Image (cartoon, helix red, strand yellow):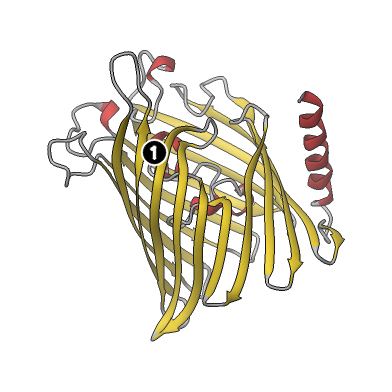
Amino acid sequence: MRMRRSLFRLIATAVFFCSLSKSGWSFEVTDRLRIDAFGTQGYLKTSSNTFLGTDHRGTFDFSAYNLLFKANPADRFQVWIELASSSQLKDEIMLEWAFGEYVVSDRLHLKFGKMALPIGIYNEMRDVYPILPLTVLPAFYTEATEFSPATFKGVGLSGQAAVGLPVEYDLFGGTSFFNHSTHTRRYENVVGGRLWLNTPHRTFRFGQTLFTGTEVVPKSTTTAEQLVRMSTYIPSIEYFSPIGLNLRGELALHYHQGELENPKDPRRLGYYLEATYLIKDRFMPVVRYDVYYPRRRDVKAAKDYQTDITVGFNYNLTDFLVWKADAHFIRGTALLVAADNPTPQTRWQLYATSLSFLF
């Protein structure tokens, strides 16, 4: 296993240095098979508290490397396979995606296998760090909040059409896991969809995501196996200005049947507002306001909420290499692991910087 990990990192590192060139790198084995790669190496540090594997001493143990294989066995049929290795996975190699896609037309794509769950704006690219605006995602895209499973095994339909206005849709059904990296918290009978409505010139787009499923709670010495119905609703909005200013925001409501007295009250609530401004195709400042409540109706102490005001930037060193830096000014401790933070600070900071490549 160690040898396989070393080989994986060797390939990813070779790809990284190739990304420094102006032409980039992409290995076309044949006219029907192509290999691409992306990854990141970052540094994290907090002013206090332990979060994302770091504390006030800082750590370079924040990395992710991915290899993407795209094959076209037939003109209308594609196969996608992605291998991933990261510090979160303890450098083990995981099969991130493996699915087939049959293109009937622009209006209908049929997918089957293991694939990214099409939820909101960032879920399908949560591991593609080079195209993310900041090193750290909004709270409700992280595993700890349990809003959005990263992938699922099953079938999906997607497409686009013009029905008065340009429309994009995704429908999906299958099995997933809330804890993607450990394959725990099984989530069965997942069904849902996402709909994007675009303005004629795609200046605005409005999204609606709704999915539901059943969590299988394993039996213990005192309880039998339980099936708990859960649902998540995510409205999204994006604005793309012609001068390079982009605005986006999302709200996530997660419902957990049987855990609250009033099932209409969301168990979890999160939202964020984000602005980016691209200057001369190279430099992009970013600001974001991010809020998370594990139980919206029961906010009494710092552990019951977490807010994050973030300022940062992207700088494209080349067309394939991106440097990011962001500072997070955080209030609350809802996402902290209690065992690692016996006496957490309510107000604290997280600092992150990374180099990411994509081609």
Decide if residue 337 is on the left or right side of residue 22. left
Q: Is residue 260 above or below residue 356?
A: above
Q: Which residue is mark 1?
A: 146
Decide if residue 279 is on the left or right side of residue 329. right
Q: Quadrant of residue 66?
A: top right
Q: Can the viewer see residue 37? A: yes
Residue 86, given in percent of the width and then of the height, sits at 64, 34
Q: Quadrant of residue 297?
A: top left
Q: Residue at x 41, y 22 (%)?
A: 337
Q: Residue at x 55, y 66 (%)?
A: 110
In the picture as drawn, the residue positioned furthest to the bottom comes out as: 164
Residue 351, given in percent of the width and then of the height, sits at 52, 34
Q: Nearer the viewer, residue 68 or 339?
A: 68
Quadrant the C terminus occupies: bottom right
Q: Is residue 52 above or below residue 200?
A: above
Q: Is residue 61 above or below residue 320?
A: above
In the picture as drawn, the residue positioned furthest to the right comes out as: 30
Q: Nearer the viewer, residue 313 or 94?
A: 94
Q: Amino acid at mark 1?
A: Glu
Q: Is residue 142 above or below residue 248?
A: above
In the picture as drawn, the residue positioned furthest to the left comes out as: 261
Q: Can the viewer see residue 252? A: no
Q: Quadrant of residue 12?
A: top right
Residue 48, given in percent of the width and then of the height, sits at 44, 22
Q: Nearer the viewer, residue 63 or 92?
A: 92
Residue 334, given in percent of the width and then of the height, sits at 33, 30
Count all numbered tags in the image, as a single digit: 1
Quadrant the N terminus occupies: top right
Secondary structure found at label 1 = loop
